[in-house]
């Protein structure tokens, strides 16, 4: 398990790291890393993807939006938002809210049009928009191998059964 977590930590820091470099850093043979990585991907523990700098692509406006609707409209709202091109991440949440979403837009005008469109289609009980001014840290959880012992401690349970792991 320790070697798997070190591999995951290194991949969180640099998802494009070469297996030879990863092998050197983790002291795990390349063939073993390759097999473990294939297994982690197949089991959904690791999901290869690219992190984008939306601003460099011309999408300068980002916001986190909380919306609360009546329970009768919840499924329809979530279905609508899950297919909307400006919704980057969508979460079902609690405490009287229906959803939290991260949205990306070219400008404030496009964001306001999106919100107006949602308000026209659904009866919004509550809404809060938080504009992202600066991104200070992103996708850092489990990225520092030096912090893994304190984080994982004795309470962390790696949910899959591993044959012959540490």
Image: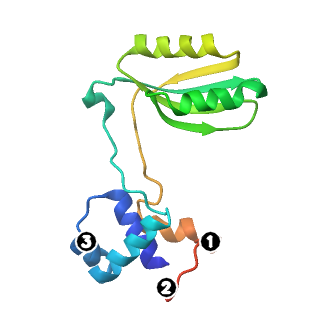
Q: Which of the two discs, 3 and 1, labels the residue nearer the N terminus? A: 3
Q: Residues within 10 Å of mark 3 (few under 14, many from 20)?
A: some
Please identify the residue farthest to the bottom as the structure is shown.
164
Q: Residues within 10 Å of mark 1 (few under 14, many from 20)?
A: few
- Check disc 2 and report its element: helix, strand or loop: loop
Instruction: Please name the residue that numbered disc 3 is placed on.
Output: 19
State how many labels appear: 3
The image position of residue 165, as x and y in percent, is 49, 85
The alpha-carbon separation of the residues under discs 3 and 1 comes to: 26 Å
Instruction: Please name the residue that numbered disc 1 is placed on.
Output: 157
User: In which image quadrant can residue 24 be found?
Assistant: bottom left
Q: Which of the two discs, 2 and 3, labels the residue nearer the N terminus? A: 3
Q: Residues within 10 Å of mark 2 (few under 14, many from 20)?
A: few
Residue drawn at x 25%, y 63% as measured from the top left: 17
Camera-nearest residue between 19 and 114: 114
Instruction: Please name the residue that numbered disc 2 is placed on.
Output: 165
- Check disc 1 and report its element: helix, strand or loop: loop
User: In which image quadrant can residue 13 be found?
Assistant: bottom left
Q: Is residue 115 above or below residue 141?
A: above
From the viewer's perspective, tell me whether residue 165 is left or right of residue 135: right
The image position of residue 26, as x and y in percent, is 33, 77
The image position of residue 154, as x and y in percent, is 63, 75
* Cβ atoms under marks 3 and 1 closer than 8 Å: no
Q: Is residue 98 above or below residue 18?
A: above
Residue drawn at x 37%, y 16% as measured from the top left: 107
The image position of residue 88, as x and y in percent, is 45, 34
Q: Which of the two discs, 1 and 2, labels the residue nearer the N terminus? A: 1
């Amino acid at each position: 398990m320790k070697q798997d977590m070190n591999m995951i930590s290194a991949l969180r820091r640099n998802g494009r790291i070469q297996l030879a470099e990863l092998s050197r850093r983790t002291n795990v043979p390349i063939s073993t890393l390759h097999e473990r990585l294939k297994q982690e991907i197949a089991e959904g523990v690791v999901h290869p993807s690219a992190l984008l700098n939306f601003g460099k692509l011309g999408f300068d406006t980002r916001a986190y939006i909380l919306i609360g609707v009546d329970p009768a409209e919840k499924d329809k709202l979530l279905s609508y938002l899950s297919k909307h091109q400006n919704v980057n991440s969508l979460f079902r949440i609690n405490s009287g809210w229906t959803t939290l979403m991260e949205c990306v837009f070219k400008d404030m005008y496009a964001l306001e049009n999106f919100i107006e469109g949602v308000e026209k289609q659904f009866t919004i009980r509550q809404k809060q928009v938080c504009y992202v001014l600066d991104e200070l840290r992103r996708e850092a959880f489990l990225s520092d191998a030096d912090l893994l012992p304190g984080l994982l401690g004795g309470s962390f349970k790696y949910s899959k059964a591993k044959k012959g792991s540490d």
